[in-house]
Structure formats: C-alpha cells, structure tokens
C-alpha cells in the first residue's frame, strides 16, 4: 500500500509491503528529491503502530494526504 502526501511544492509517500524472503513487514518513507528510509518489522502489531504514528507525524508536520491508501501495482501480498 502507498499513501501520498504533499506540502508546499513537495511530495512524499509512505509505502508498505511484505518481504516474502525475510518474513518481514517493510515501511519505506520517501520524498521526491530526498533520501528514503526503509524500516523492517517482524511483528504485525509493531508495524501497524508505526504506520499510524507516521500518518500522525505527517499531519503534525502539515503534510496534506493526497490519496487514501492505494494498492501497489504488484499488490501487497502479506504473510502466507
């Protein structure tokens, strides 16, 4: 899933996915023209809490969410 945000003339996003090869939940935080950060979580509850915290952080920093959560083209498979 991916959430897109904008502020002034800048864009950023939060991307989530499941890494089948490691069994980890992955969060990518990125901005156009900026560095991206990759975080990995083995526990679903910790992963979910981090996503909620990130959304709150973006709102507190005055980012506007452009879209709701959107599925990635490849789909988010989740654990099997």
Image (cartoon, rainbow, N blue to C red):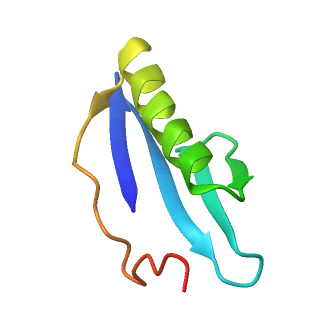
Question: Residue most toward the right?
Answer: 22
Instruction: Report the side of 13 relative to 31 (left or right).
Output: left
Residue shown at the point (50%, 76%) measured from the top left: 78
Question: Residue most toward the left?
Answer: 67
Residue shown at the point (39%, 57%) measured from the top left: 2
Instruction: Report the side of 15 relative to 36 (left or right).
Output: left
- Give above or below for 58 relative to 38: above
Residue 60 position, x and y percent, is: 40, 13
Choose between 31 and 49: the one closer to the eye.
49
Instruction: Report the side of 47 relative to 73 (left or right).
Output: right
- Residue 29 visible at all: no
Residue 80 position, x and y percent, is: 54, 86
Residue 25 position, x and y percent, is: 62, 62
Residue 34 position, x and y percent, is: 64, 39
Q: Quadrant of residue 58?
A: top left
Q: Quadrant of the N terminus?
A: bottom left
- Give above or below for 35 relative to 60: below
- Give above or below for 10 relative to 78: above
Residue shown at the point (51%, 38%) measured from the top left: 49
Residue shown at the point (71%, 49%) measured from the top left: 39
- Give above or below for 41 relative to 56: below
- How many badges with numbers are in the image? 0
Instruction: Report the side of 68 relative to 49 (left or right).
Output: left
- Residue 70 visible at all: yes
């Amino acid at each position: 899933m991916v959430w897109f945000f904008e502020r002034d003339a800048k864009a950023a996003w939060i991307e989530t996915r499941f890494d089948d090869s490691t069994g980890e939940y992955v969060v990518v935080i990125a901005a156009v023209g900026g560095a991206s950060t990759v975080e990995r979580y083995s526990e679903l509850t910790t992963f979910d809490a981090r996503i909620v915290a990130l959304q709150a952080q973006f709102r507190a920093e005055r980012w506007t969410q452009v879209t709701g959560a959107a599925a990635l083209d490849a789909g988010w498979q989740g654990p099997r």
